[in-house]
Amino acid sequence: MTGLPLTGVTVVSVEQAVAAPYATRQLADLGARVIKVERPGGGDFARRYDTTVHGQSSYFVWLNRSKESVTLDLKSPAGRDVLEELLARADVFVQNLAPGAAARLGLDAASLTQRHASLIPCTISGYGTFGPWADRKAYDLLVQCQTGLVSLTGTPEETARVGVSIADIAAGMYAYSGILTALYTRATSGEARAVEVSLFEALAEWMSQPAYYTRHGGTQPPRIGTQHATIAPYGAYTAADGKQVLFSIQNEREWAALCERVLARPELADDPRFATGSDRVAHRDQLDAVITERFQRSGSAEVMKLLDAAGIANAGVNDVREFIEHPVLAERNRWHEVAIPGAVVPALRPPADLAGIEPRMDPVPAVGEHTERVLAELGVTAARIEGLRADGVI
């Protein structure tokens, strides 16, 4: 698409599931041509995670707009030959194959750099390409467990997973920013540098604050549901109409305003149990009892109005339907239509707005939809294409 920042950049991906497709979709949003190589037949297994979006997978629809799908059997010499022709014309190669699979196919970064000096290879792995866990499979929830995230999430009685694929998303974001950095480096120095990201190390970075707290405090932050582990009051409380309202006190001025204008108990501002942030955390149970009693006397709308008037940040605890219908998304025109096989669906535009640039939001491809066209661009004859199809290569 003319005018987009990555117009002219070609990305070839051998990707599946979430992390790598998330990275490449963001490149496509900015105008890169993303050629997604899938298995003949079923394609990316994320296509079959569910069938809720007009028969398509919600994961696949989210992650694969604006891409071209080419089917290739990479276990066959003919399929690898075609991939090699694609790589010879590409700027970036992204893969998140199972441990060891890329090396067996000659698609590891070291091999690719020898054959294609200007190509930027990006590897997304579970625990890194070397080290004691390099051969272990890794999925999002496994990584949530290994990084200790699950131990922080939930209630005192029970742990819980984060409700989105947070390890995959973290890795996809670092792969995306790493690829952009590598493209910039190549443009300014002429040197193509490989990018490597692991799910474990991406989420490990996001666990740094609780790691510091635990290493230097002696115990890890407690698991307390929607309450903040180290700030009080900062959490959700149930109003009289049953809806939860979350609010946050960040300083002593806000604490005094809460006591006077919301709790109607100004004397609490000077109560030694609640005098400082640390005091309020230490006496959280007594503080929660005061707030809970006050919230049970007012509906959620009234509570939020009082908090707003006091200058205290707050939000109703929405369900997904309320999020979908959020006025900020509607009034800021964040929903745009995207075609999928057999239907058109709303999709959120990318969150980073570039002045004067409209993001690319082209269709989600069917399996192998662009195979013949892409092969024809490589100079593959119609007869050879039919031969590849007959042999199950495409």
Image (spheres, rainbow, N blue to C red):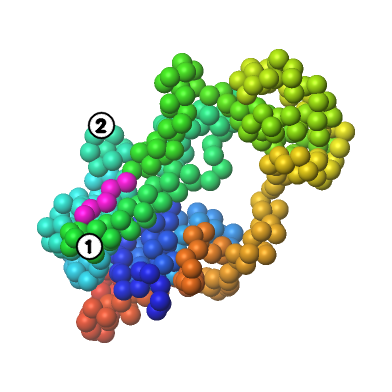
How crowded pointer 1 is (Cα within 10 Å; few <14, some 14-19, many 20+) is rated as few
Amino acid tagged 1? Thr
- Which residue is located at x 51 percent, y 27 percent? 151
In the rendered view, would you say 295 is above or below 335? above
Choose between 385 and 162: the one closer to the eye: 162
Residue 166 x %, y %: 48, 44
How crowded pointer 2 is (Cα within 10 Å; few <14, some 14-19, many 20+) is rated as few
**Element type at marker 1?**
helix
The residue sitting at the bottom extreme is 382
**Element type at marker 2?**
loop
Residue 128 in sight in this render = yes
The image quarter in which residue 83 lies? bottom left
Residue 112 x %, y %: 17, 57
Direction from residue 139 to residue 256 in the image, left or right: right
Circle 2 is placed at which residue position?
A: 132
Q: Is residue 43 magenta?
A: no
Direction from residue 160 to residue 68 in the image, left or right: left
Quadrant of the drawing holding the C terminus: bottom left
Residue 135 in sight in this render = no
N-term-proximal mark, 1 vs 2: 2
Choose between 151 and 49: the one closer to the eye: 151
| Residue bounds of the magenta highlight | 193-197
Circle 1 is placed at which residue position?
A: 188
Choose between 344 and 91: the one closer to the eye: 91
